[in-house]
Image: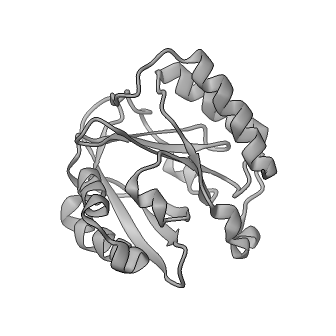
Amino acid sequence: MSTFGVKCFVLLALYHSSVISGEKCFLPHGQPNLDFKKISETSWFVGLQTHDALATKVQCVKLDNFTTTITGFKFIAEEYGDGPVDVKYSVNFVRRGANGLYSFDKQKDEISLISSHRLIFQNDYTKKVHDTDNDELTGNGVVFWTDYKNYFALIECRNNGGWIIWVYFPSITPSVTNLVALYNKLHEIGVSTTFHISRCSKHVDLIDLENHIF
């Protein structure tokens, strides 16, 4: 098991023994007044994710170029699969009132999101994968939490009541400090689910892109 795997095993064992919450998703309040200038000071690499259909092929995701828009904000997502195809596309979010609630901008993102995943999954782009994409585009909203230096978390609920949580760190091998900061926030907002470790570490070409902020 990798060093990151050991860190995650210890952290998640502690996490599941201390948070008294069911597996059924509820959308917590989001972080108000996100500072996108601070978020943009680093690139973010997915480290932990719920085991949804996208995680079967999307091994790693890098987020950067966060910018505000008239209706909310956007970033650039670069996704790496287990094949030769990597994809890069813009993801747009629309602010939906108070409590840090956003939604995907379906009008802008539907074609690019589904087309990108069709390229990564190729013949494995199944109905289950399409349903996950559709849940992201048509769900009840998405919230974000970050401390700007340790983690950036995207949290949403699937239409069937399951979680979609992708947690990003400033390194493909997060430190204990990164993980504990995330754990403390999830515990604070009452989020409990089963996580899986991303496969970013398989992409050694990303090492030079790390920020090494701990």
Tell me which residue sits at (54%, 28%) in the image.
Answer: 186
* Residue 125, percent from left and from top: 32, 71
Query: Where 113 sits versus 47, above or below?
Result: below
Quadrant in the picture for the C terminus: top right
Q: Residue at x 45, y 18 (%)?
A: 21
Q: Is residue 209 visible?
A: yes
Camera-side residue of 208 and 42: 208
Q: Which one is nearer the viewer's eye here, 152 or 37? A: 152
Q: Position of residue 7 (x, y in %)?
A: 76, 40
Residue drawn at the location 40% of the way across and 32% of the way down: 30
Q: Residue at x 25, y 35 (%)?
A: 97
| Vertical relation: 4 (above or below) 81 | above
- In this rendering, would 18 be left or right of 201? left
Q: In this view of the protein, which residue sits in the foreground, 102 or 192?
A: 192
Coloured how? one colour
- Marks counted in the figure total 0
Asked which quadrant contains residue 33, the reply is: top left
Occupied quadrant, residue 18: top right
Q: Could you say where residue 172 lies in the image, as x and y percent from the top left? A: 69, 58
Q: Position of residue 192 (x, y in %)?
A: 48, 27
